[in-house]
Image (cartoon, helix red, strand yellow):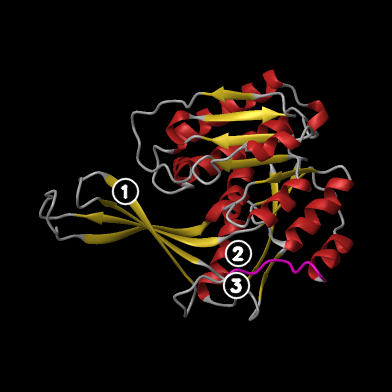
């Protein structure tokens, strides 16, 4: 794989704490069962954080942009990114930064007994999450102005004005822009981000009405369908389905979407398909099938980066 390929990333980061509830006296549906919570992982995560760590594992250089606070957790997030192979030259820690803490608890549903996951987002010293993005009016233009290399891909997962500015400027310079929104709730910003992007990936669970895609003839849309796989639409040529790869050893599915993204980006880099004009339906289908295989393998490990940790442990 071409080690020279570079991906610049910005958006949502969090310090993910993975907790597993154990039931020492057994579990009975319909009653309040006693449990013990065990922390099994505590590393940087969220979409942008995960993809920043997964790309180096797949042979691609990642350059995350982030501004965290000076708390122990904020400093750990930078260290984690570096330890997973990301280049952290654009990661800053200061009193003005923002650090989000995300607690992911694996447990059994009291009513059904089925495995489920709950999430709680906070920040150091507060019960509310705190995020910090490049400001559109000054920080984003300044960042682009001092950027001393041109990445092959710019990835962002938040439709903030500053990130849209970076995306638009880099796209004008020939960089492939990949947008994966955490949410499409704010429709106006969502559509503005699409305008400056080449590839847009989202979940059918979050975006149910796909009619907006019909107005674009120069983009690749990817819509994930959970256990059913995904579908894609290249340059408004029509939606095509890609079936999910089955896995009988499911441990944790939460990082599967980020692995799909990371493997797809890595494969685009490997084949030097770094513009919409180079893309064809057959090759995109093949690349997404490969991405689904990697995502399927990842769910046999606990934690979004459990597969990486397992490989490291074997060395």
User: Could you say whether the residue bearing mark 2 is in a helix, strand or loop?
Assistant: helix
Q: Earlier in the sequence, mark 2 or mark 1?
A: 2
Would residue 47 be counted in the magenta stretch? no
Question: On the image, which quarter does residue 152 sit in?
Answer: top right
Residue under label 1, please give it: 116
Residue drawn at (85%, 60%) of the image: 144
* Residues at marks 2 and 3, CA–CA distance in whole angstroms: 12 Å
> Foreground mark, 2 or 1?
1
Distance, label 1 to label 3, CA atoms, is: 29 Å
Q: Which residue is mark 2?
A: 78
Q: Residues at badges 2 and 3 in contact (C-beta under 8 Å)?
A: no
- Provide the secondary structure element on which disc 3 rests: loop
Q: On the picture, is 164 further left or further right than 21? A: right
Residue drawn where x is 35% and y is 41% of the image: 251
- Nearest the viewer among 41 and 48 is 48
> What residue range appears in magenta?
131-137
Determine contact: label 2, label 1, CB under 8 Å: no
Please name the residue that numbered disc 3 is placed on. Answer: 98
């Amino acid at each position: 794989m071409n080690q020279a390929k570079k991906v610049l990333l910005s958006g949502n980061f969090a310090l993910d704490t993975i907790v597993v509830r154990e039931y020492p006296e057994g579990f009975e549906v319909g009653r309040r069962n006693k449990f013990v919570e065990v922390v099994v992982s505590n590393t940087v995560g969220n979409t942008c954080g995960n993809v920043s760590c997964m790309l180096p594992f797949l042979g691609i250089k990642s350059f995350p942009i982030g501004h965290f606070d000076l708390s122990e957790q904020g400093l750990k997030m930078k260290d984690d990114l570096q330890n997973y192979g990301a280049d952290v030259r654009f990661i800053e820690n200061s009193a003005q930064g923002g650090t989000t803490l995300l607690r992911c608890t694996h447990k059994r549903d009291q009513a059904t007994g089925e495995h489920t996951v709950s999430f709680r987002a906070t920040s150091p010293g507060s019960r509310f999450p705190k995020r910090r993005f490049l400001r559109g009016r000054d920080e984003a233009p300044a960042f682009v102005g001092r950027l001393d290399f041109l990445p092959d891909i710019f990835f962002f997962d938040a439709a903030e004005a500053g990130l849209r500015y970076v995306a638009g400027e880099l796209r004008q310079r020939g960089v492939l822009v990949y947008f994966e929104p955490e949410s499409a709730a704010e429709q106006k910003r969502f559509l503005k981000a699409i305008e400056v992007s080449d590839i847009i990936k989202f979940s059918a669970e979050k975006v149910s009405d796909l009619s907006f895609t019909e107005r674009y003839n120069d983009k690749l849309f990817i819509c994930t369908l959970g256990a059913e796989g995904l579908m894609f639409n290249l340059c408004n040529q029509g939606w095509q389905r890609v079936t999910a790869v089955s896995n009988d050893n499911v441990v944790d599915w939460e990082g599967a979407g980020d692995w799909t993204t990371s493997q797809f980006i890595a494969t685009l880099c490997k084949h030097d398909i770094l513009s919409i004009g180079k893309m064809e339906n057959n090759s995109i289908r093949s690349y997404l099938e490969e991405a689904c295989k990697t995502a399927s393998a990842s769910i046999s490990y606990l934690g979004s980066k459990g597969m990486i940790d397992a490989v490291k442990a074997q060395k």
